[in-house]
Amino acid sequence: MKWRGRQRSSNIEDRRGAGRTGGFGGPMLGRGGGMRIPMGGGSRGGIGGVLGIVVVLGILWLVSGQNPLDMLSGGSSTGFAPSSTTFRQLPAEGEDELADFVGVVVKETEDLWTQVFAASGEDYPEPQVVLFTGQTNSGCGVADSSVGPFYCPADSKVYIDLSFYDQLHREFGAPGDFAQAYVLAHEVGHHIQNLTGVLPDFNRRRQAMSQTEANAYSVRVELQADCYAGVWANYAGQQNLLESGDIDEALNAASQIGDDTLQKRMQGFAVPKTFNHGTSAQRESWFERGYRSGNPSDCDTFSGSV
């Protein structure tokens, strides 16, 4: 990816090395009007109620023993926001290459989604991206590197321990800077879902669902985020940011973190009823659909089969 020399996002919060500090305040209540843009899936109502849910990339859940759907309902998080957290400013440009890269990718996602929302007469509330080491406090409870990158709708922030990228390469066989960009674009996709009502709708619906039904619905949520990541990849191509092999890197990453591939790697067999992010084939397919189309409206994973 041709990212060097490009503008970084101002929405990067660097907490690396800071650790967890401070106590916990009151519950985070998500309020606001909700965006109405033509993307399909979920209700278009306002974002209301307690949004103590987390959408996790899910790569490490088999290792940590933590089911991402428990986090989706707030079952394993406190649902409280930190009353105080120390953090430092992002290093000056060029001082930290990986942080620079994240800042540039986030800025490019901001540029895309600002355009998309503006086309529907809406402003795009940009998410914050928090870089941390080990653990930090979040609006959805304690953010731990063991669960991988995730988006917290309670505070509209993406949390990532950058050591995850080394793990993505070494342990999951997904090297390359565009594989890393795909991870960020996927999490920003969850932010879009929060704004459009998809995540609040899922949180309401799953209260009446069985575990198997909730897993199946979660797959549709995750595949839409993959498709949105593909839409961003299309935009990156329009900006002449793509290099040879970039899309292959993203498709390989999507394949390596498919539920079937992960389960077979970890335990030697797959249990389809427990899938909550989609198979390797599904994740590749929906990313590629978004990339080929470049249109968020083609990312409706909630109608028909996936």
Image (cartoon, helix red, strand yellow):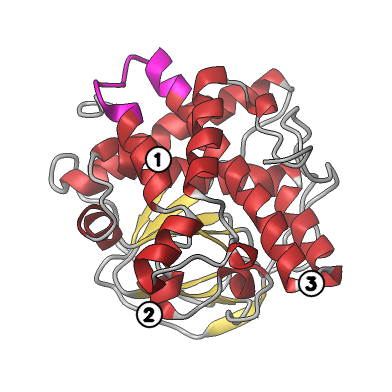
Q: Which residue is mark 3?
A: 210
Q: Amino acid at mark 1?
A: Tyr
Specify the segment rendered in magenta. Answer: 234-247
In the figure, 295 relative to 9: above or below? above
Residue 198, percent from left and from top:
73, 48
Disc nearest the viewer among 1 and 3: 3
Residue 39 belongs to the span the image colors magenta: no
Q: Which residue is mark 2?
A: 20
Disc nearest the viewer among 2 and 1: 1
Q: Residues within 10 Å of mark 3 (few under 14, many from 20)?
A: few
Q: On the rendered image, what quadrant is the N terminus found in?
A: top left
Q: On the rendered image, what quadrant is the C terminus found in?
A: top right
Say which label, 2 or 1, has the lower sequence index. Answer: 2
Q: Are marks 1 and 3 in contact (CB under 8 Å)?
A: no
In the figure, 101 relative to 90: above or below? above
Q: Amino acid at mark 3?
A: Ser
